[in-house]
Image: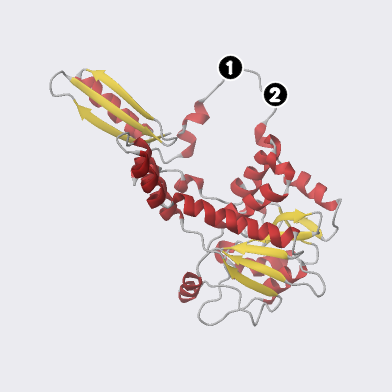
Amino acid sequence: MIDVVERRPNSITTGGILVLKCKNFRILTIEIVGWTEFINIATSIELLSNLNEPRLFYPYFYNPEFTFVENGWDQFKIEHEFANLTHFSDEWRLSMVNKNFEVCRTYPEKVIVPKSITDDCIRSIAQFRCLGRFPVLSYYHKPTKKVLLRSGQPMVGTNSKRCKDDEKLINTVLGVGKRGFIIETRTQNLAQLARNKGGGFELEMHYPLWKRVHRPIDRHSTLLDSLSKLIEACNDTTLSMDKWLSKLETSGLLSHVKDVLSSACLVAQCLDQDNVSVLVHGSEGMDSTLQVCSLTQIILNPDCRNIYGFEALIEREWLQAGHPFATRCKHSAYTM
C-alpha cells in the first residue's frame, strides 16, 4: 500500500519523522525517537514496500482469525458463464486451446469462442494478433443476441498482412447480412504509426462488413500523471475554491473519465439500440480495451451491478483478461 517513503531527520533531537504516502492517497506521519531506530525502520519499510516477488507480499502471510463463509478464489468459473450462455445461444463452445497458456500467456486456459472456429484456426489467429490475444467473447447481450468481442491489435504491418481465419472468426458473429463496429481506442494517427512497428488495424478491404470508429483513450502513463496532479491539488489546503477547481480541470482526469464513459456508452448503444456486434481493441488490449468492455457490461447487464456480479466482472474482464496489475499498480500518484 505504500507508494513513497519520505525521511525527515530531526536536527534538534535524535531521530526523525517518516512520511508514508500510500497508494490509497492517505498520508501517515510517524515520529521516531533515536537515530538508529529511525534509519532501521525507514530502511525496512522501503525494502518491504518495493518487493518484486508477489509471494512475499503481505496477503500471503495474512491469517485472519475468522471462519470463511465461502472461497472467493472459486467464486467465478468460466464453466458457469458458458452454461448461462448456452441457454440463449448454441453458437459458442468452451475451448481448451490455451491449455498451459501455450497460445496466449495473458488469456485463461479456457476461452469461449464461436463453435464453427476450430482450435487450429485460433492458433493461426493468435499469431496474427498482438501478444496472441485473439478475439474472444467478452459479453453476450441477450435482448438483441449481439456480442461484444475484445482482442489485441492485428499485426498488419506496412505490408498489409492478412489472416483469413481471423476474418472468418469475427465475421461469424455477425450473422447473414449484418454489419459490425470496431471500436479502436487509439487515435487514427497512433493506429497508423503502429503499422510501422508491425501492428495496425483491420483494413477495410479485408473486413468490409466492419466499420472502424476511433474513440481514443490515453495510455496509462498519461492517466497516472493526471491522477498525480489531482492528488497534489487535493493535498494543498491553501488553495481557494476557484484555484482548486482550476487545478482539477488542468489535471485532465475528468476528461479521461469522460472519454472512457462515452466510449462505453457508444458500445452499449451499438449492442442494445443499433442491434450490431462490436469488437474493441487498442494496441495490446490490456488497458483501455478492458475499461470499455467492463463499463459496457455495467451499463447493460444488471447482474454486474451487484456484489457477486461485479466480483465476477473483475475476475473475468481484468484478472483472467491479463491486465498487468503488477506493473500498473506498482506506483501511484505520489511517485510521478
* Mark 1 Cα-neighbour bin, 10 Å: few <14, some 14–19, many ≥20: few
Percent x, y for residue 86? 84, 52
Q: Which mark is residue 69?
A: 2
- Residue 16 in view in this figure: yes
- Quadrant in which residue 2 is drawn: top left
Q: Nearer the viewer, residue 39 or 179?
A: 179
Q: How many numbered circles are shown?
A: 2
**Residue kind at label 1, given as amino acid type:** Glu
Q: What kind of element bears circle 1? A: loop
**Residue kind at label 2, given as amino acid type:** Val
Q: Which mark is residue 33?
A: none
86 lies left or right of 113:
right
Percent x, y for residue 317? 63, 49
Q: Nearer the viewer, residue 33 or 96?
A: 33
Percent x, y for residue 176? 82, 73
**Separation (CA) of disc 2 from disc 1:** 13 Å
Q: Nearer the viewer, residue 247 or 170?
A: 247
Q: Quadrant of the N terminus?
A: top left
At 51% across and 50% down in the image, what residue appears?
Answer: 324
Percent x, y for residue 136? 68, 59
What residue does disc 1 label? 65
Q: What kind of element bears circle 2? A: loop
